[in-house]
Image (spheres, rainbow, N blue to C red):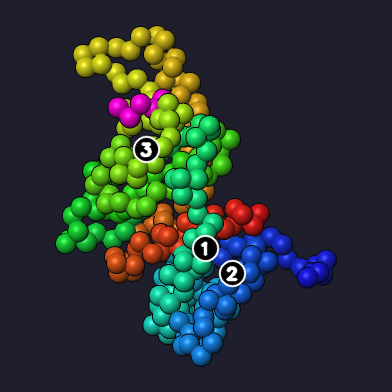
Amino acid sequence: MELPDNFPRRANRRTCIIPLAFLDLGARIHVAIAEGEKTPWPPILGLYKALVVTLTYLRRNRAQAEIAETYGVSQSTISRAITGLTPIIGALLDEFVPTAEELDPRRQYIVDGTLLPCWSWRSHRSLYSGKHKTTGLGVQVACTLEGTLAWISDPIDGRRHDSYSLQDSQVLITLNPENWIGDKGYVGNGMLTPYKKPQGGELKDWQKEFNHQINKVRWVIEQVIANLKTWRILHTDYRRPLNTFGEAISCVIGLHFYRMACE
C-alpha cells in the first residue's frame, strides 16, 4: 500500500507509536476479535478511540477522570476501555518480546534491576523494597554494550534483591555469566562486577581502576531503563487494582519492543 507523501511518520506524542504501527496494531486487534463476539471496548468509543485512550494511559499514567473529560465520557467508560484492551495488546505483541532462550550466548550483556512502583497495599508487604523505600514489582533488564534493549524478566515482588531476581529468572542457566556485567548487587554470580570495599580496609589502586572502568560501561543500562520508563505507568505509582499490574507491565513491555521493531 502506497502512502501519501504527507502521511505522518513521527510517533504520536500521546501514544508514542508511529501512525503506521498504530494502524497495524488496530488491525491486529480487529482480527483477534472473532466475528459476532462482543467487543472488549465501550461502543461509545469505538476501537480507534479506545486504543488511543489505552495507549495514552499507559504512556502518560494520566488520571482516568482527566482522560474521560477529554473524550466527553465517564471515568468508568475509560476504565472499561483500558481493562478490555490491555491484556489483548499484551497477548498480541508477545511475539515481539525476546525470551532468555533467544539471547546470544556469544554477546556481552549489561544487566540491572529496577522497581516498577505501585500503591502501598497493606495486605502485600512483600512488595516493599527496602532499597527504594517504596512498594512495587521488580524486573531485571539486560542490554547490549551498544545500548540496545535485549531482554526483560518477568516481574517479581519488590522485596527481592537483584541477585535473587536474576537467579529466579534462570536467564544464566544456558549463558556464560562471565559475559555479563552488573553492579555490586550481583557479586557471587560469576559476572563482571565492581570489587566491594573490604570490611575495615581499602581497595587497591588497580581494583579502584577496575571499578571505574566497569562503571564507565554500566551507564548504558541506566539509559536503557530510563528510556523504558518513559512509559510513565512503569515510573509513577500504578493506581489500578494490583491484580492487573502484571498484565499492564506485560502490555507495556510488548509495546516497547514493538515500537523498537517498527522504528
Of mark 3 and mark 1, the one earlier in the sequence is 1
Please tell me which residue lies in front, 135 or 148.
148
Type of amino acid at the residue the image marks with label 1: Leu
Disc 2 to disc 1: CB gap under 8 Å: yes
- Crowding around mark 1 (Cα neighbors within 10 Å: few <14, some 14 to 19, many 20+) is many
First reached walking from the N terminus: tag 2 or tag 1: 2
Would you name the residue on which mark 2 appears?
25
Residue 93 circle label: 1
In this figure, which residue is indicated by the disc labeled 3? 173
Residues tagged 3 and 1 counted as in contact (Cβ below 8 A): no
Q: Position of residue 221 (x, y in %)?
A: 48, 38
Which amino acid type is shown beneath numbered disc 2? Leu
Q: Of helix, strand and loop, which one carries label 1?
A: loop
Given the image, on which type of amino acid does mark 3 rest?
A: Ile
Residue 249 disc label: none
Q: Earlier in the sequence, mark 3 or mark 2?
A: 2
- Report helix, strand or loop for mark 3: loop
Eye-nearest disc, 3 or 1:
3
Q: Is residue 190 magenta?
A: yes
**Helix, strand or loop at mark 2:** helix
Dot 2 surroundings within 10 Å: few (below 14), some, or many (20 or more)?
some
Q: CA distance from mark 3 to mark 1?
A: 26 Å
The span picked out in magenta is: 188-192
**Residue 219 pos. (x, y %):** 49, 33
Residue 175 locus on image (x, y percent): 43, 35
C-alpha span from label 3 to label 2: 34 Å
Q: Nearer the viewer, residue 85 or 236?
A: 85
Q: Is residue 18 magenta?
A: no
